[in-house]
Protein backbone atom coordinates (compact mmCIF):
# COMPACT_ATOMS: atom_id res chain seq x y z
CA UNK A 1 0.00 0.00 0.00
CA UNK A 2 1.35 3.43 -0.93
CA UNK A 3 1.30 5.67 2.14
CA UNK A 4 3.87 8.27 1.15
CA UNK A 5 3.29 11.57 2.97
CA UNK A 6 2.66 14.74 0.96
CA UNK A 7 4.75 17.54 2.41
CA UNK A 8 4.06 21.21 1.72
CA UNK A 9 6.71 22.90 -0.44
CA UNK A 10 7.03 25.79 2.03
CA UNK A 11 8.38 25.02 5.53
CA UNK A 12 5.81 25.34 8.30
CA UNK A 13 5.62 28.78 9.96
CA UNK A 14 3.85 28.64 13.32
CA UNK A 15 1.57 31.42 14.55
CA UNK A 16 3.47 33.65 16.97
CA UNK A 17 2.33 34.11 20.57
CA UNK A 18 1.68 37.71 21.57
CA UNK A 19 3.15 36.79 24.99
CA UNK A 20 6.55 36.29 23.28
CA UNK A 21 7.14 40.05 23.41
CA UNK A 22 6.58 40.06 27.19
CA UNK A 23 8.93 37.10 27.48
CA UNK A 24 11.64 38.99 25.60
CA UNK A 25 11.28 41.92 27.99
CA UNK A 26 11.51 39.61 31.04
CA UNK A 27 14.68 38.10 29.61
CA UNK A 28 16.26 41.50 29.07
CA UNK A 29 15.37 42.71 32.57
CA UNK A 30 16.67 39.52 34.15
CA UNK A 31 20.06 39.71 32.40
CA UNK A 32 20.35 43.44 33.19
CA UNK A 33 19.57 42.75 36.87
CA UNK A 34 22.11 39.92 36.88
CA UNK A 35 24.81 42.17 35.41
CA UNK A 36 24.07 44.90 38.01
CA UNK A 37 23.50 42.60 40.99
CA UNK A 38 26.83 43.17 42.71
CA UNK A 39 26.57 46.98 42.51
CA UNK A 40 23.09 46.70 44.01
CA UNK A 41 24.30 44.51 46.89
CA UNK A 42 22.32 41.49 45.72
CA UNK A 43 24.07 38.12 46.15
CA UNK A 44 24.58 36.21 42.90
CA UNK A 45 23.69 32.59 43.58
CA UNK A 46 24.57 30.00 40.96
CA UNK A 47 21.96 27.31 41.31
CA UNK A 48 21.06 23.98 39.70
CA UNK A 49 17.64 23.20 38.34
CA UNK A 50 15.52 21.38 40.95
CA UNK A 51 17.11 23.32 43.79
CA UNK A 52 14.58 25.53 45.61
CA UNK A 53 15.10 28.87 43.89
CA UNK A 54 12.54 30.33 46.31
CA UNK A 55 15.29 30.58 48.95
CA UNK A 56 17.37 32.80 46.68
CA UNK A 57 14.54 35.26 46.05
CA UNK A 58 13.64 35.21 49.75
CA UNK A 59 17.18 36.54 50.41
CA UNK A 60 16.72 39.14 47.67
CA UNK A 61 19.46 37.35 45.75
CA UNK A 62 19.58 36.77 42.03
CA UNK A 63 19.76 33.18 40.83
CA UNK A 64 21.87 32.18 37.86
CA UNK A 65 21.25 28.81 36.22
CA UNK A 66 24.28 27.51 34.31
CA UNK A 67 21.97 24.93 32.66
CA UNK A 68 19.78 27.68 31.28
CA UNK A 69 22.81 29.65 30.20
CA UNK A 70 24.33 26.66 28.38
CA UNK A 71 21.01 26.36 26.54
CA UNK A 72 21.32 30.03 25.55
CA UNK A 73 24.92 29.43 24.38
CA UNK A 74 23.65 26.53 22.30
CA UNK A 75 20.85 28.52 20.66
CA UNK A 76 23.38 31.31 19.94
CA UNK A 77 25.66 28.70 18.30
CA UNK A 78 28.65 29.26 20.60
CA UNK A 79 28.25 26.10 22.70
CA UNK A 80 30.46 23.85 20.59
CA UNK A 81 33.47 26.14 21.05
CA UNK A 82 32.79 26.47 24.76
CA UNK A 83 32.48 22.69 25.15
CA UNK A 84 35.81 22.30 23.36
CA UNK A 85 37.33 24.81 25.79
CA UNK A 86 36.06 22.66 28.68
CA UNK A 87 37.62 19.59 27.02
CA UNK A 88 40.93 21.44 26.63
CA UNK A 89 40.98 21.70 30.46
CA UNK A 90 40.64 17.95 30.79
CA UNK A 91 36.89 17.39 30.96
CA UNK A 92 35.45 14.62 28.80
CA UNK A 93 33.16 15.18 25.82
CA UNK A 94 30.96 12.49 27.39
CA UNK A 95 30.18 14.77 30.30
CA UNK A 96 26.80 16.47 30.59
CA UNK A 97 27.01 19.25 27.96
CA UNK A 98 25.42 21.74 30.33
CA UNK A 99 28.43 21.24 32.61
CA UNK A 100 31.00 21.08 29.80
CA UNK A 101 29.74 24.30 28.22
CA UNK A 102 29.71 26.04 31.62
CA UNK A 103 33.33 25.02 32.17
CA UNK A 104 34.16 26.72 28.86
CA UNK A 105 32.37 29.89 30.05
CA UNK A 106 34.15 29.70 33.41
CA UNK A 107 37.70 29.10 32.12
CA UNK A 108 37.51 31.39 29.11
CA UNK A 109 35.34 34.13 30.66
CA UNK A 110 33.35 34.08 27.45
CA UNK A 111 29.58 34.29 27.31
CA UNK A 112 26.64 33.60 25.03
CA UNK A 113 26.62 37.10 23.54
CA UNK A 114 30.32 37.56 22.82
CA UNK A 115 30.67 39.15 26.26
CA UNK A 116 32.47 38.07 29.43
CA UNK A 117 29.58 35.90 30.55
CA UNK A 118 27.78 35.97 33.88
CA UNK A 119 29.14 37.56 37.08
CA UNK A 120 31.06 35.18 39.32
CA UNK A 121 28.99 33.50 42.04
CA UNK A 122 28.87 34.77 45.63
CA UNK A 123 27.34 31.45 46.66
CA UNK A 124 27.04 28.13 44.86
CA UNK A 125 23.80 26.33 45.74
CA UNK A 126 22.98 22.81 44.56
CA UNK A 127 21.09 19.70 45.50
CA UNK A 128 21.53 15.99 45.04
CA UNK A 129 17.85 15.82 44.18
CA UNK A 130 18.06 15.56 40.38
CA UNK A 131 21.29 13.85 39.34
CA UNK A 132 24.76 13.12 40.67
CA UNK A 133 26.37 15.33 38.02
CA UNK A 134 25.15 18.43 39.83
CA UNK A 135 27.14 18.15 43.10
CA UNK A 136 30.33 17.09 41.29
CA UNK A 137 29.96 19.91 38.76
CA UNK A 138 29.35 22.42 41.57
CA UNK A 139 32.44 21.12 43.42
CA UNK A 140 34.54 21.78 40.28
CA UNK A 141 33.18 25.33 40.08
CA UNK A 142 33.83 25.84 43.81
CA UNK A 143 37.49 24.92 43.28
CA UNK A 144 37.64 27.60 40.58
CA UNK A 145 35.66 30.43 42.20
CA UNK A 146 36.59 29.61 45.82
CA UNK A 147 33.26 30.92 47.12
CA UNK A 148 30.95 29.30 49.70
CA UNK A 149 28.98 26.29 48.47
CA UNK A 150 25.84 24.73 49.92
CA UNK A 151 24.68 21.27 48.82
CA UNK A 152 21.19 20.26 49.91
CA UNK A 153 21.14 16.51 50.46
CA UNK A 154 18.09 14.52 49.32
CA UNK A 155 17.04 10.91 49.64
CA UNK A 156 16.60 9.33 46.22
CA UNK A 157 13.14 7.78 46.28
CA UNK A 158 11.79 5.67 43.41
CA UNK A 159 8.68 7.78 42.88
CA UNK A 160 6.24 9.96 44.81
CA UNK A 161 4.51 6.84 46.21
CA UNK A 162 7.68 5.82 48.01
CA UNK A 163 8.24 9.29 49.41
CA UNK A 164 7.83 8.87 53.16
CA UNK A 165 7.35 11.52 55.90
CA UNK A 166 10.90 10.71 57.01
CA UNK A 167 12.35 11.74 53.58
CA UNK A 168 10.27 14.91 53.61
CA UNK A 169 11.33 15.87 57.16
CA UNK A 170 14.96 15.25 56.33
CA UNK A 171 14.81 17.45 53.23
CA UNK A 172 12.95 20.21 55.15
CA UNK A 173 15.73 20.14 57.78
CA UNK A 174 18.31 20.41 55.00
CA UNK A 175 16.49 23.50 53.69
CA UNK A 176 16.59 25.09 57.15
CA UNK A 177 20.30 24.39 57.35
CA UNK A 178 20.74 25.97 53.90
CA UNK A 179 18.90 29.07 55.18
CA UNK A 180 21.20 29.21 58.22
CA UNK A 181 24.26 29.10 55.95
CA UNK A 182 22.85 31.68 53.56
CA UNK A 183 22.22 34.02 56.49
CA UNK A 184 25.86 33.58 57.45
CA UNK A 185 27.25 34.11 53.93
CA UNK A 186 24.97 37.04 53.01
CA UNK A 187 24.91 38.72 56.44
CA UNK A 188 21.15 38.98 56.06
CA UNK A 189 18.35 37.52 58.17
CA UNK A 190 15.63 35.65 56.29
CA UNK A 191 12.32 37.44 56.86
CA UNK A 192 9.33 35.13 57.36
CA UNK A 193 7.05 37.61 55.54
CA UNK A 194 9.38 37.69 52.51
CA UNK A 195 9.54 33.89 52.34
CA UNK A 196 5.75 33.79 52.60
CA UNK A 197 5.40 36.22 49.69
CA UNK A 198 7.91 34.35 47.51
CA UNK A 199 6.22 31.01 48.17
CA UNK A 200 2.81 32.44 47.25
CA UNK A 201 4.23 33.86 43.99
CA UNK A 202 5.91 30.57 43.18
CA UNK A 203 2.70 28.63 43.85
CA UNK A 204 0.65 30.97 41.66
CA UNK A 205 3.09 30.70 38.75
CA UNK A 206 2.89 26.90 38.99
CA UNK A 207 -0.92 26.92 39.19
CA UNK A 208 -1.07 29.05 36.03
CA UNK A 209 1.42 26.80 34.25
CA UNK A 210 -0.73 23.76 35.19
CA UNK A 211 -3.79 25.48 33.67
CA UNK A 212 -1.87 26.07 30.43
CA UNK A 213 -0.67 22.48 30.45
CA UNK A 214 -4.28 21.26 30.85
CA UNK A 215 -5.40 23.36 27.89
CA UNK A 216 -2.92 21.60 25.61
CA UNK A 217 -5.42 18.71 25.67
CA UNK A 218 -7.77 20.73 23.42
CA UNK A 219 -8.08 19.71 19.78
CA UNK A 220 -6.44 21.36 17.96
CA UNK A 221 -3.78 21.88 20.58
CA UNK A 222 -3.26 25.61 21.08
CA UNK A 223 0.52 26.05 21.37
CA UNK A 224 3.68 24.52 20.02
CA UNK A 225 6.33 22.57 21.88
CA UNK A 226 8.79 25.37 21.04
CA UNK A 227 6.47 27.84 22.81
CA UNK A 228 6.28 25.50 25.80
CA UNK A 229 10.05 25.20 26.07
CA UNK A 230 10.60 28.91 25.49
CA UNK A 231 7.93 30.00 27.96
CA UNK A 232 9.53 27.88 30.69
CA UNK A 233 12.13 30.59 31.29
CA UNK A 234 10.16 32.44 34.02
CA UNK A 235 9.14 29.16 35.68
CA UNK A 236 12.79 28.15 35.91
CA UNK A 237 14.50 31.47 36.59
CA UNK A 238 11.88 33.87 38.00
CA UNK A 239 9.79 31.47 40.08
CA UNK A 240 8.88 33.32 43.26
CA UNK A 241 8.60 36.76 41.63
CA UNK A 242 5.48 38.79 40.80
CA UNK A 243 6.77 39.21 37.24
CA UNK A 244 6.53 35.46 36.60
CA UNK A 245 2.93 35.43 37.86
CA UNK A 246 1.95 38.34 35.62
CA UNK A 247 3.58 36.70 32.60
CA UNK A 248 1.73 33.40 33.10
CA UNK A 249 -1.59 35.21 33.55
CA UNK A 250 -1.06 36.82 30.16
CA UNK A 251 0.00 33.53 28.59
CA UNK A 252 -2.93 31.62 30.17
CA UNK A 253 -5.40 34.19 28.81
CA UNK A 254 -3.90 34.02 25.33
CA UNK A 255 -3.91 30.22 25.28
CA UNK A 256 -7.50 30.17 26.55
CA UNK A 257 -8.57 32.54 23.81
CA UNK A 258 -7.01 30.21 21.25
CA UNK A 259 -8.79 27.20 22.75
CA UNK A 260 -12.15 29.03 22.89
CA UNK A 261 -11.77 30.00 19.23
CA UNK A 262 -10.40 26.61 18.17
CA UNK A 263 -7.17 28.18 16.96
CA UNK A 264 -4.55 25.44 16.73
CA UNK A 265 -0.81 25.49 16.46
CA UNK A 266 -1.10 23.20 13.40
CA UNK A 267 -4.08 24.33 11.27
CA UNK A 268 -5.18 20.80 10.24
CA UNK A 269 -3.99 18.71 13.13
CA UNK A 270 -3.71 15.05 12.11
CA UNK A 271 -1.42 13.57 14.76
CA UNK A 272 -0.87 14.25 18.45
CA UNK A 273 2.52 13.41 19.90
CA UNK A 274 4.55 13.43 23.10
CA UNK A 275 8.09 14.83 23.13
CA UNK A 276 10.22 12.98 25.66
CA UNK A 277 12.72 15.01 27.57
CA UNK A 278 15.33 17.59 26.64
CA UNK A 279 14.92 20.17 23.88
CA UNK A 280 17.64 20.38 21.22
CA UNK A 281 18.64 23.96 21.83
CA UNK A 282 20.90 24.24 18.79
CA UNK A 283 18.10 23.05 16.49
CA UNK A 284 14.75 23.91 18.07
CA UNK A 285 13.19 24.22 14.62
CA UNK A 286 13.32 20.44 14.31
CA UNK A 287 10.17 20.42 16.45
CA UNK A 288 8.33 22.31 13.71
CA UNK A 289 9.38 19.73 11.12
CA UNK A 290 6.73 17.40 12.58
CA UNK A 291 4.13 20.09 11.88
CA UNK A 292 4.84 19.74 8.16
CA UNK A 293 3.16 16.33 8.46
CA UNK A 294 0.23 17.75 10.45
CA UNK A 295 1.69 16.57 13.77
CA UNK A 296 1.65 18.60 16.99
CA UNK A 297 3.25 17.87 20.32
CA UNK A 298 0.46 18.02 22.87
CA UNK A 299 2.20 17.18 26.12
CA UNK A 300 5.52 16.42 27.76
CA UNK A 301 6.81 15.73 31.24
CA UNK A 302 9.96 17.84 31.06
CA UNK A 303 8.14 21.19 31.16
CA UNK A 304 6.11 20.11 34.14
CA UNK A 305 9.17 19.27 36.20
CA UNK A 306 9.45 22.96 37.01
CA UNK A 307 5.92 23.41 38.29
CA UNK A 308 4.49 22.21 41.64
CA UNK A 309 2.10 23.59 44.20
CA UNK A 310 3.30 25.07 47.51
CA UNK A 311 1.67 25.98 50.81
CA UNK A 312 2.79 29.32 52.27
CA UNK A 313 1.70 28.16 55.75
CA UNK A 314 4.16 25.27 55.52
CA UNK A 315 6.96 26.62 53.30
CA UNK A 316 9.66 24.08 54.15
CA UNK A 317 7.36 21.04 54.15
CA UNK A 318 5.73 21.97 50.86
CA UNK A 319 9.08 22.83 49.26
CA UNK A 320 10.26 19.37 50.34
CA UNK A 321 7.18 17.78 48.75
CA UNK A 322 7.67 19.66 45.50
CA UNK A 323 11.38 19.15 45.08
CA UNK A 324 11.30 15.48 46.08
CA UNK A 325 8.41 14.40 43.89
CA UNK A 326 9.08 15.85 40.44
CA UNK A 327 8.80 13.24 37.73
CA UNK A 328 12.47 12.96 36.79
CA UNK A 329 13.09 11.19 40.08
CA UNK A 330 10.65 8.41 39.14
CA UNK A 331 12.05 5.12 37.82
CA UNK A 332 11.10 3.99 34.30
CA UNK A 333 7.90 2.22 35.49
CA UNK A 334 6.82 5.34 37.36
CA UNK A 335 7.43 7.50 34.30
CA UNK A 336 5.56 5.07 32.07
CA UNK A 337 2.59 5.33 34.47
CA UNK A 338 2.68 9.13 34.23
CA UNK A 339 2.75 8.90 30.44
CA UNK A 340 -0.13 6.41 30.36
CA UNK A 341 -2.36 8.96 32.09
CA UNK A 342 -1.27 11.68 29.68
CA UNK A 343 -1.72 9.48 26.60
CA UNK A 344 -5.40 9.11 27.52
CA UNK A 345 -6.00 12.68 28.60
CA UNK A 346 -4.24 14.27 25.60
CA UNK A 347 -5.37 11.68 22.97
CA UNK A 348 -1.83 10.83 21.92
CA UNK A 349 -0.91 8.92 18.73
CA UNK A 350 2.82 8.42 19.32
CA UNK A 351 5.87 9.35 21.37
CA UNK A 352 9.22 10.80 20.26
CA UNK A 353 12.26 10.11 22.42
CA UNK A 354 15.21 12.46 22.11
CA UNK A 355 18.01 10.21 23.31
CA UNK A 356 20.22 12.93 24.71
CA UNK A 357 23.53 11.11 24.84
CA UNK A 358 25.16 13.42 27.36
CA UNK A 359 22.50 12.78 30.01
CA UNK A 360 22.71 9.11 30.68
CA UNK A 361 20.59 9.17 33.82
CA UNK A 362 17.50 10.25 31.90
CA UNK A 363 18.05 8.51 28.58
CA UNK A 364 19.07 5.02 29.69
CA UNK A 365 15.47 4.31 30.66
CA UNK A 366 13.83 5.55 27.44
CA UNK A 367 13.87 2.15 25.64
CA UNK A 368 12.11 0.58 28.67
CA UNK A 369 9.48 3.30 28.74
CA UNK A 370 8.93 2.87 24.97
CA UNK A 371 8.48 -0.91 25.40
CA UNK A 372 5.99 -0.50 28.25
CA UNK A 373 3.89 1.96 26.24
CA UNK A 374 4.05 -0.23 23.12
CA UNK A 375 3.18 -3.47 24.94
CA UNK A 376 0.41 -2.05 27.11
CA UNK A 377 -1.13 0.61 24.87
CA UNK A 378 0.18 -0.22 21.39
CA UNK A 379 1.75 3.26 21.23
CA UNK A 380 4.36 3.65 18.46
CA UNK A 381 7.58 5.48 19.19
CA UNK A 382 10.49 7.14 17.45
CA UNK A 383 13.91 7.40 19.06
CA UNK A 384 16.90 9.31 17.78
CA UNK A 385 20.22 10.37 19.24
CA UNK A 386 21.37 13.90 19.82
CA UNK A 387 22.90 16.24 22.34
CA UNK A 388 20.80 19.01 23.86
CA UNK A 389 23.60 21.63 23.82
CA UNK A 390 26.54 20.47 21.70
CA UNK A 391 25.78 20.04 17.97
CA UNK A 392 28.54 17.47 17.59
CA UNK A 393 27.06 13.98 17.47
CA UNK A 394 23.77 15.13 15.98
CA UNK A 395 23.02 14.40 12.32
CA UNK A 396 20.09 16.48 11.11
CA UNK A 397 19.65 14.69 7.76
CA UNK A 398 19.52 11.29 9.43
CA UNK A 399 17.08 12.49 12.08
CA UNK A 400 14.77 14.03 9.46
CA UNK A 401 14.82 10.79 7.45
CA UNK A 402 13.78 8.89 10.59
CA UNK A 403 10.99 11.38 11.22
CA UNK A 404 9.69 10.94 7.66
CA UNK A 405 9.53 7.14 8.07
CA UNK A 406 7.83 7.50 11.44
CA UNK A 407 5.21 9.84 10.03
CA UNK A 408 4.53 7.48 7.13
CA UNK A 409 3.95 4.68 9.58
CA UNK A 410 1.63 6.83 11.72
CA UNK A 411 -0.32 7.86 8.61
CA UNK A 412 -0.80 4.24 7.62
CA UNK A 413 -2.00 3.32 11.11
CA UNK A 414 -4.34 6.21 11.72
CA UNK A 415 -5.63 6.85 8.19
CA UNK A 416 -5.38 3.52 6.34
CA UNK A 417 -6.20 3.76 2.64
CA UNK A 418 -9.36 1.80 1.78
S1 LIG B 1 21.22 17.11 31.69
FE1 LIG B 1 21.22 15.21 32.85
S2 LIG B 1 23.32 14.98 33.61
FE2 LIG B 1 23.06 17.13 32.97
S3 LIG B 1 22.47 18.20 34.83
FE3 LIG B 1 20.58 17.64 33.78
S4 LIG B 1 19.97 15.68 34.66
FE4 LIG B 1 22.13 16.03 35.21
Image: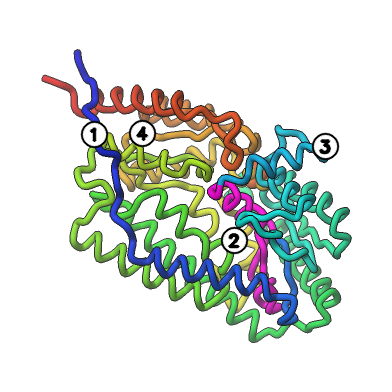
Question: Which residue, given by chain and number where applicable, does mark 3 sit on?
Answer: 90
Q: In this picture, is 194 found above or below 51?
A: below
Image side of residue 353 versus residue 346, left or right: right
- In 3D space, how far apart are the residues under numbered discs 2 and 1 (Cα atoms)? 46 Å
- SS class of the residue under badge 4? strand
- Bounds of the magenta segment: 47-76
In this rendering, the label closer to the viewer, 1 or 3: 1
In this rendering, the label closer to the viewer, 2 or 3: 3
- In 3D space, how far apart are the residues under numbered discs 4 and 2 (Cα atoms)? 29 Å
In this rendering, the label closer to the viewer, 1 or 4: 1
- SS class of the residue under badge 1? loop
Which residue is found at the position 45% from the left and 23% from the top? 398
Question: Which residue, given by chain and number where applicable, does mark 1 sit on?
Answer: 9
Q: Quadrant of the N terminus?
A: top left
Q: Earlier in the sequence, mark 2 or mark 1?
A: 1
Question: Which residue, given by chain and number where applicable, does mark 2 sit on?
Answer: 322
Amino acid sequence: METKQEKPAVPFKPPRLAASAALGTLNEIYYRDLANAKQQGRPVVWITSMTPIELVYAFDGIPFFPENYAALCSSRKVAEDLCKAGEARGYSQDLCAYALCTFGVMFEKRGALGDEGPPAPDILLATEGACMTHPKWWEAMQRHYKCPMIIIDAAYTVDSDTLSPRHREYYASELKEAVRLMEKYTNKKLGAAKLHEVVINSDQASALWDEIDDMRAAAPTPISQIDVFTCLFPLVTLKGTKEAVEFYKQLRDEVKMRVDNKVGFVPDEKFRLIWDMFPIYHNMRLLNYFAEFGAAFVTDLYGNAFSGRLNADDPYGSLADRYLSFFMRAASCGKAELYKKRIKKYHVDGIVFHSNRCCRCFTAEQPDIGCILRDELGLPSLMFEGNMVDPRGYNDAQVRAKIESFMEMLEARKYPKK
